[in-house]
Image (cartoon, rainbow, N blue to C red):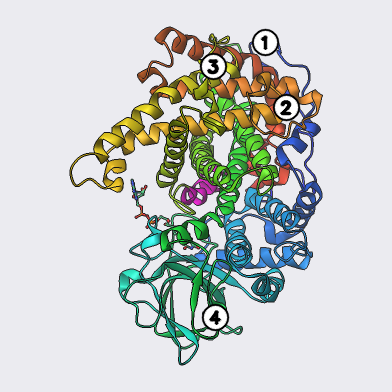
Amino acid sequence: MVSATRPAGAATVPALPLPPCAATTSAPLAILPPIDVPAAQRHMEGHDHATRAAVLAVMAGSPTFRLHPGESKEVERARTAARWAELAGAGLFVDTVAAADAAAGRAKLDAIHETASLLDYSLCIGMSVHFSLFGGSIAALGTPAQAAAWLPGVEALTMRGCFALTELGHGSNARGVETEARYDAAADTFVLHTPTDAAQKYWIGGAATTARWAVAFAQLYMPGEAASRGVHAFIVRIREDDGALVPGILLADCGYKVGLNGVDNGRIWFSHAPVPRGHLLARYARVDAAGVYTCDAPSPDALFGVTMSALSGGRIGIAASGVGQARVALAIALRYALRRRAFAATPTTPETLLLDYPMHRRRLLPRLASTVVHQTALNDLKARWGRALSAKDGHVASCGFKSIMTWHALETMQVAREACGGQGYKSENRIGVSRAALDISATFEGDNTVLLQQVTKSCLASYARGGKSGGRWSGALEHLNHPLPLPPPIASMAFAVYTLRRAEATLLPRLAAAIAASAAEPGATPFAAFTAHQVAADAVAQVHTQLLLLVAFMSATGTGGGGGGGGGTARVPRSLRPLLDTLGTLHALAVVDDNAALLRVGALSPADAAAVHDAIDGLCTALRPHAAELAAVMTVPDFLLAPIAFDVVAHNSRARL
Ligand SMILES: Cc1cc2nc3c(=O)[nH]c(=O)nc-3n(C[C@H](O)[C@H](O)[C@H](O)COP(=O)(O)OP(=O)(O)OC[C@H]3O[C@@H](n4cnc5c(N)ncnc54)[C@H](O)[C@@H]3O)c2cc1C
């Protein structure tokens, strides 16, 4: 995607000059002081700025990182591998998964994955399967001795791994995987076996060609026992270092996908494959030299919960890649809308810039505002992860944020591609191709719909706990203890918080009562009782997650009155407050406008709904003069944009044929 009309790649994020045709055809007054773009870009990046700059420098400086859409999966895989090797060659992975300071190592890795994802989602996912899922499983589920033995090889890429949880027959219901690990006391090994074709491991990133090792999840059977001790994780060699097959392992390629073809997803069958006893990741459950099994969790179900929640940090990475790609799409679409003209009022007047159409602003600017809010809330979550956040709150936030943010990103990319018209459909203009790759983010690392059920279940548990303690609720449900105050002004974040809380105060007790009534029916199970009310449960999760997001943004930025009790980091420079206040308000209005449940439960009156709807147009119009700066706030270097973000006519000139 090298273009004579585009600037050569730059290692740092440049300030975006206002294009000459960005003058408005109508001229609304600016509501903000000039935006402090460099400060806003640092805010969007959040952390590890030097690492991000180093990744960008490698990407900008190497022909390996130029884009070539439409290649075969073999060529794409080879290119992804070459890109990964160049990043490794630049020493970027030193002090990541094997770092003495695990939190700093994780933050550095996040920065590398997020920056790579701006260019190539396959590169991001290939790396994150190896480092965060394979290495992350060893770190989270292994003993300190296992971590010390294996993580240096993971970091140095001498122990290439994949993450083998999903089976053809069991994806979302990972607890139901059928792969067996039977402990053989005489040989002091586990024997891994795939009992049926439905139990083959499926979609395993890296398994088709690159991985030499897998963390494989299997039901553990101890000698003489018919019942499984639950799902356990094993480190299994699936190929020799030279790529040769190993006995007992059969591997196959998943073939072409809708996108993400730079990742070699594969299938794995185990055929009575022996695995040394010391290769069971043994932080929470173990078999000792005498063949005795012990587990720190009270039941196989509890062990599964601990095992999966240890991995929930990976969902934050998926959310972050989504937000990053929404930023790229918005930067491209906004810049295009500041150059492209269509229709004139009279034959003698210039045609109108796309961004001077109210509808065009309405499609792009609320999404841009939400993208900034999501990025801020995510940066705040990462800063608090493992420190000022309980495991339960982290799990809820990671499930909810991943779902809302990846759906938002996918819709935003679709809108951005349409906003660029036919040019948006051209591969070289990136948005559609990136959207196809990102599409999978809605269903992997936890299917979004299923993840939102986790959010609701946690809300229901907290609600029941509060009820049992005499109607005293805590944490995110603390607002249920107080009557709601008078409604704040409509064009404010506080109004959205007020409205979402009103809705939650109705939806959650109503759902709890409905599930309790179903559970009291003869022969009912907790599963059936919850399932009967899944649709209402989804509305609770949507409202709860939007609240978490907005409150996190307000407390992390000190805007909108602080947001009522979020544990945010509030470190943003003063110069950014007006921008963040305005974008936060626009996002808040859009959330209320989009959520029909608020009207259904009477948390929002039809008159207020109409006022919210109109206020969005007002803010979009007012932000119009800042559009070029807002495109720069998306923090995408020029070399990661697309030809349509520059002079599309020059790029397509006859002279360049
Ligand atoms: C490109 C790609 C890469 C992947 N990489 C890996 C990897 O490296 N390692 C790995 O282990 N896995 C990987 N996966 C697998 C991925 O994690 C699973 O696809 C995911 O968990 C969903 O499982 P499933 O595909 O079986 O869908 P299903 O679980 O069959 O879901 C299908 C649909 O049913 C709905 N549904 C399911 N249960 C419920 C319910 N209780 N209530 C309401 N609706 C429900 C879901 O919302 C979804 O829409 C990858 C998948 C892909 C496509």
Q: Which residue is mark 1?
A: 27
Label number found at residue 358 = 3
Looking at the picture, which amino acid does disc 4 mark?
Asp
Name the mark nearer the viewer: 2 or 4.
4
Point out residue 277 in the picture as x, y percentages from the top left corner: 53, 82
Task: Specify few, some or many for label 2: CA neighbours under 10 Å numbering under 14, 14-19, or 20 or more.
Answer: some
Point out residue 544 in the picture as x, y percentages from the top left corner: 49, 32
Label 2 and label 3: CA atoms lie apart by 19 Å
Residue farthest front in this picture: 470
Looking at the picture, which amino acid does disc 1 mark?
Ala
Report if residue 438 lies within the magenta region. yes
Q: Eyeballing the image, is 639 above or below 63?
A: above
Q: Eyeballing the image, is 55 above or below 634?
A: below
Looking at the picture, which amino acid does disc 2 mark?
Glu
Label 4 and label 1: CA atoms lie apart by 75 Å
In magenta, the rendered stretch is 427-441
Q: Which residue is mark 4?
A: 288
Q: Eyeballing the image, is 130 above or below 308?
A: below
Q: Residue at x 35, y 20 (%)?
A: 600
Looking at the picture, which amino acid does disc 3 mark?
Pro
Q: Which residue is mark 2?
A: 629
Label 2 and label 1: CA atoms lie apart by 16 Å
Name the mark nearer the viewer: 4 or 1.
4
**Residue 27 seen:** yes
Point out residue 480 in the picture as x, y percentages from the top left corner: 49, 24
SS assignment at label 4 = loop
Q: Nearer the viewer, residue 270 or 119?
A: 270
Task: Specify few, some or many for label 3: CA neighbours under 10 Å numbering under 14, 14-19, or 20 or more.
Answer: some
Label 1 and label 3: CA atoms lie apart by 13 Å
- The image quadrant that residue 289 belongs to is bottom right
Name the mark nearer the viewer: 2 or 1.
2
